[in-house]
Amino acid sequence: GDSTTVRADRDVDAATFASRPVLLLGRPEENAWTRRIAPGLPLAFTDSGFRLFGRTYERPDDVVHLVYPNPLAPERFLLLIAANAPEALARRGGFFEFGDDDWHVVRGGDVVRRGRFASDPAHPWRYDASLDRDLETERERFATTLVRLPGRALVVRSARGSALAVAARTRGDALLAAMSADGLVPRAGAAPIVLTLYHDLQEKGRIAHDTRPEHLGDEGAGAAPAAGRTTLDLWSVTAARWRQLGATRDAPLLVPAAVWRAGRLEGEPLDVAVARLYFARLLPTARDAAARTTEWRSPLIDVPARALLCRALWESSGSRAPRALVGALSVSGLSTLDSLCRPLGVDPERVARRYAALADSLSHAAERALREREARPWRPADGFQRGVCLAHSVDLESGYLSAECAKQLVTLKGMGVNWVSLTPFGYLPSLHTPEIYPSAEGGVDGETDEAVCEAAARARALGLRVWLKPHLWTRGWVGELDFVPSDWPRFFERYRAFVLHYALLAARERMDGLFVGHETVTASLGFPERFRALIGDVRRAYPGTLSYGANWDREVDGIAFWDALDLIGVSFYYPLADRPGADVATLTAGATRALAKLRALAARTGRPVLLDEVGYAPTASAALEPWQEAHGGASQPLAQRDCYEAVTRALEPADWVAGVFWWKWFSGASREADEPRTFSPRGQPAEAVMTRALRQWQGRPVRVLRAAPTH
């Protein structure tokens, strides 16, 4: 479905340039078309940089991203990416990071300015200073508000009167004192470590351009409390001490070594994180933990395993331990356990044995604490799941991480919602490429792990239960994945890593349910044994409710592994009519026929059915092709409303349905969320129908139909 072509500037004439949207790469001296249309753009290029809305950017690592009408065809858009030096494009965020903005200035991998044009029919694409965010200035202002709280070896910078600052200084000083007692003492005259505290992860993302609860930057450590946590891990402080001792900032073992010394990772004791992997049979051996990786591996596996490796290396080195660890943290890349240990004079077999012994003893000691943290699975006696699919608005200020998302969750609870589903993504370059790139460690605007966890913690604090529902996406529909036979094993290898990452995340965060897949039709129908094996792996890592989100068409009836799951999940996009303009009675009859097919499946499998997606865009064809988003044409909000009404009426006698999740409600205000032709019912007549149904479903029972006997 991708219509993109790549062309050299010299090969494109004016008619072609005006015929379609354009992604324009390069400065005027690099790209003839940039030079030609520059006078029609709201920025000016200088000999060594560019000037945008009153400020000049001439550092070599400055990059500008601009969305603007094509000057040759204003009804089509233009994306411009231009860097002051080619190397700047290779850094984080340099090549493509538009999100929901109209412009970004990226400096050294960090966004330093972002904004949107004001838009109204009379003055489209108008600059409005109130929509322009100069993040450099904001960071400077933020720094002036901080007060310093000095300790013995640590200085904490925070807002005045922060109780968290006192606790962080006390514990941080204790961690550093313990390292000093073990011979990890910085040279005389070393400056104290500086820890900057932020109010929350959103502020941290805006100021530090890093939304993780902790990070180590050029100016020291940074941390912010994640939702639902009252203390900090402070591995960033111990990482700063390792750096004082000579560790390389990009050393693969730096963060693991810091986590080992802090004893905590993402809000829980390190021993519990190790035990989760150990009992799930996911903990790598010492040799695997030390091996070089050329592809993405879950940090929920890598970091605890390598933290354990650092401890094993320390305990196997005797009096040489401080020198050995600092030496290991000076290695910018890993290869094998032997190559790691050899220059340190440490026996790799001894390290491997110590690693295995630690894994066994620590895991069994932490098993009780691990089990106490497990979420309780949903049971039919818990009642009907009144749900909404909470969609991430791709923006720091309105995505899962944001205060705006917290407000939306409060709104949803008030409407009668008692469950939400959260959707991180994995990206495949094409339908024919068996590689998956998770959003787990994406930029500040994305569905990162910390963003998903923030939304989940806030939902649970309101008494809402949470499904984690990772999706794959690509250019086209993932239900039509089409690999050559030799590539399918590679796909399932990468897919297993993807799903197990979210299984571990869901377990750690005590989420109530997890989907092991969503609409991967050719994969689920073609390789059911692969999914059955994957479900077994997930069960060992995650104790909550499991389902799979099947496509309404041939997939839901064709899946052969429903017996391995707790609920039948279905994307309920059955056509409700065969002609536009059908009345509610006709649409209700269509929904009733679709539900009858699912009732037969529920009876055959002995599993309740969860309508994990039910949604309609406000279009004239909403009832005919419910899976289609609107593309052009006038919005038809009453057609959307009528489909919502029909489904709620058809569901009245269907007590074998476990719940309904309306697709979709955005986490915050954004252009997509506010677009009147999206699936969102917010602000549309369908919202009232949805709210009424959610409230009427309160206390609704769920009945399990008896499975048909087998012979």
Image: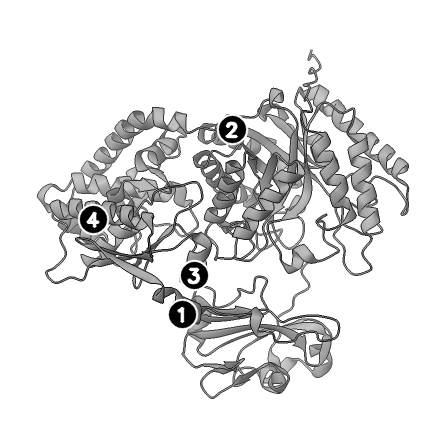
Give the mark nearer the N terminus: 1 vs 4: 1
Cβ–Cβ below 8 Å for labels 3 and 2? no
Residue 561 visible in the picture: no
Which residue carries the number 4 mark? 173
Residue displayed at 69% across by 12% down: 709
The N terminus is located in which quarter? Answer: bottom right
Quote the CA–CA distance across marks 3 and 2.
Answer: 34 Å
Give percent across and percent down for residue 175: 21, 45
Q: Earlier in the sequence, mark 2 or mark 4?
A: 4
Distance of label 4 from label 3 (alpha carbons): 26 Å
- Vertical placement of 476 versus 102: above or below? above
Q: CA distance from mark 1 to mark 4?
A: 32 Å
**Mark 4 / mark 3, whichever is N-terminal:** 4
Tell me the element at label 4: helix
- Quarter of the image for the C terminus: give it: top right
> Residue shown at 54%/44% (left/top)?
491
Image-based side of 219 in relation to 460, left or right = left
- Dot 3 or dot 1: first in sequence order is 1
Circle 1: element type: loop
Can the viewer see residue 663? yes
Q: Position of residue 272 (x, y in %)?
A: 34, 33
SS at badge 3: loop
Q: Of label 2 and label 1, which has the lower sequence position?
A: 1
For marks 3 and 2, the one nearer the N-term is: 3
Residue with the mark numbered 1? 108
Check disc 1 and give the amino acid type: Gly
Q: Amino acid at mark 2?
A: Gly
Q: Residue at x 52, y 54 (%)?
A: 446
Q: Mark 2 highlights which residue?
A: 544
